[in-house]
């Protein structure tokens, strides 16, 4: 029962997080696919691990996919805009 509750909680949190991220990107007028790739990769990591847990498929394939998504997200962070600190 707790795994179902945690899965539902994760799905709800991800929906709010995606909406917040899209709203924030629009507010900051950040566009382009290269700046969205890190967020997309980190969301996909959560989805891959949740599906792997549901299907009892926690193994080499899910770990490899997680590491590749993590490396891809980390690489594309160099395209994120640098915000200026307000003094």
Image (cartoon, rainbow, N blue to C red):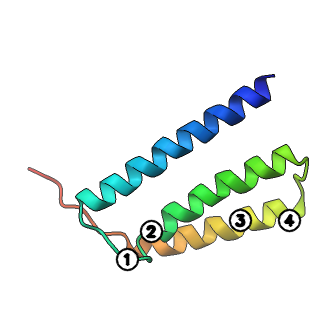
- Circles 2 and 1: CB distance less than 8 Å? yes
Residue holding disc 3: 67
Q: Is residue 87 left or right of residue 28?
A: left
Q: Label 1's element? A: loop
For marks 1 and 3, give the CA distance. Answer: 24 Å
Looking at the picture, does residue 41 appear above or below residue 72? above
Check residue 32 in the rendering and tell me which mark sits there, or answer none: 1
Mark 4, secondary structure of its residue? helix
Q: What x and y, as percent, mark residue 5?
A: 71, 26
Compare marks 2 and 4 and give the one earlier in the sequence.
2
Comparing 82 with 57, the one in front is: 57
Mark 2 packing: few (<14 Cα in 10 Å), some, or many (20+)?
A: some
* Mark in the foreground, 2 or 4: 2
Residue to which mark 4 is pinned: 61
**Secondary structure of the residue carrying numbered label 2:** loop
Q: Position of residue 44 (x, y in %)?
A: 63, 59
Image quarter where the N terminus lies is: top right
Q: Which residue is mark 2?
A: 36
What is the CA distance from the residue labelled 4 to the residue labelled 3? 10 Å
Residue 6 occupies which quadrant of the picture?
A: top right
């Amino acid at each position: 029962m707790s795994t179902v509750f945690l899965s539902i909680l994760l799905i709800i949190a991800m929906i709010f997080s995606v909406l917040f991220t899209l709203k924030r990107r629009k507010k900051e007028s950040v566009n382009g696919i290269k700046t969205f790739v890190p967020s997309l990769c980190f969301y996909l990591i959560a989805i891959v691990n949740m599906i792997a847990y549901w299907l009892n498929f926690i193994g080499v394939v899910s770990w490899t996919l997680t590491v590749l998504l993590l490396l891809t997200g980390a690489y594309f962070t160099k395209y994120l805009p640098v915000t200026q600190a307000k003094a």
